[in-house]
Amino acid sequence: MTDWLQPTDEWPHEPGPEQLWSESWYLDFHDRDGEVGGYVRVGRYPNLGVVWYWATVVGPGRRTVLVADHEVPVPAGRSLELRAPGLWADHNVETPLEHFSLGLEAFGVALDDPADAYRGLRGDRTPLGFDLEWETDGAVFPWPMGFDRYEIPCRVHGEVLVGEERIELDGFGQRDHSWGVRDWWSTAWCWNAFRMDDGRRFHTVSVRPHGGYAIGYDQHPDRELQVVTRAEVVEEPGPEGIPTGAVATIEGRRFEVEPLAWAPLLLVAPDGRESRFPRALARFTDDAGVRGLGWIEFNQPPAAAAG
């Protein structure tokens, strides 16, 4: 663990000069049974003059409802209140590193096939609303100095609106915040964060191909956080590059990963390159039969997404 992180790091940072310098806030959630989950990403690209905004609700047997707007105006100063046609969202640091809330009122699309996100987001226009709070539930994990990123395991509660459906949520999730140059179109990675039924939490990022950089944590409720430096995810390829399953190995501990519902995105670079970004609510089961829930993502830049 490092101690560079300050409470003021929760808010926006001074951007660098690079075109692809960005600042990202992710907030994901799931209920206790894996019936519903979702996430939000605020991606500020000040040197491109836009915010990428994503929000989704998924679940087994549910249509993926997805908001994906890559032309939201950048708000002034430290504000994270966003406004665009069909979209209002506000994101608030209530207590630094302890409590974060967000409100969302937007129109998304309900997809019959999650892979329709790669084909122009064809689907039914659907209202989507969040009134949610993330409260820290474990140790805050700053990445090593120089990576400008931290991850926080959370309890999540509040209300989710999908069309005319109202969902009261009392569950778990993860939030993270990072800033710096991020080139989605040159580097492949796998990120995951999940909570086991015994309260143990895991998070890893592994750069691909296998054998590259990995970082993360293993948090046991009765022990100090352990930093993870060895992690690998091997997925089972599926149609359009969306995996049908995976095996994650974290410091020698093996987990079967069962995707429960996908929310993919197509990411287009300023020069026209395309990267595919499948992200899933998933069930994680270790070799002892202990199960858990969380999220997993695969960034698939042009070479990786070709199949």
Image (cartoon, rainbow, N blue to C red):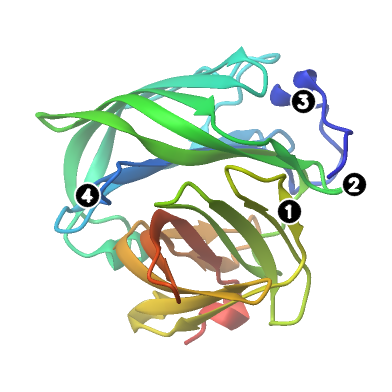
**From the viewer's perspective, is 152 left or right of 110?**
right
Q: Rounded to the nearest whole Å, what is the CA distance between mark 3 and mark 4?
A: 33 Å
Q: Does residue 23 appear to the left or right of 83 in the view shown?
A: right
Amino acid at circle 1? Gln
Q: Looking at the image, is mark 1 or mark 4 earlier in the sequence?
A: 4
Q: Residues within 10 Å of mark 4 (few under 14, many from 20)?
A: some
* Label 1 element class: strand
**Quadrant housing the N terminus:** top right
Mark positioned earlier in the residue sequence (4 or 2) = 4
Q: Are marks 1 and 4 in contact (CB under 8 Å)?
A: no
Residue pictured at 71% horizontal, 47% vertical: 225
**Lateral position of residue 295 relative to residue 140, left or right:** left
Q: CA distance from mark 1 to mark 4?
A: 30 Å
Identity of the residue furthest to the left in this view: 164
Kind of residue at badge 4: Glu
Q: Which residue is mark 2?
A: 146
Q: Is residue 103 visible?
A: yes
Mark in the foreground, 1 or 3: 1
Q: Position of residue 90 (x, y in %)?
A: 47, 18
Residue denoted by label 3:
9
In terms of sequence position, does the residue under pointer 2 or pointer 3 come before the other?
3
Looking at the image, residue 152 lies above or below residue 187: above
Q: Residue 226: which disc?
A: 1
Per the model, the C-alpha gap separating discs 4 and 2 is 38 Å
How far is disc 1 from disc 3 in space, using C-alphas? 23 Å
Label 3 vs label 4, nearer the camera: 4
Which residue bears the numbered disc 4?
A: 35
Q: Earlier in the sequence, mark 1 or mark 3?
A: 3
Q: Position of residue 151 (x, y in %)?
A: 65, 41
Q: Residue at left 22%, top 49%? A: 35
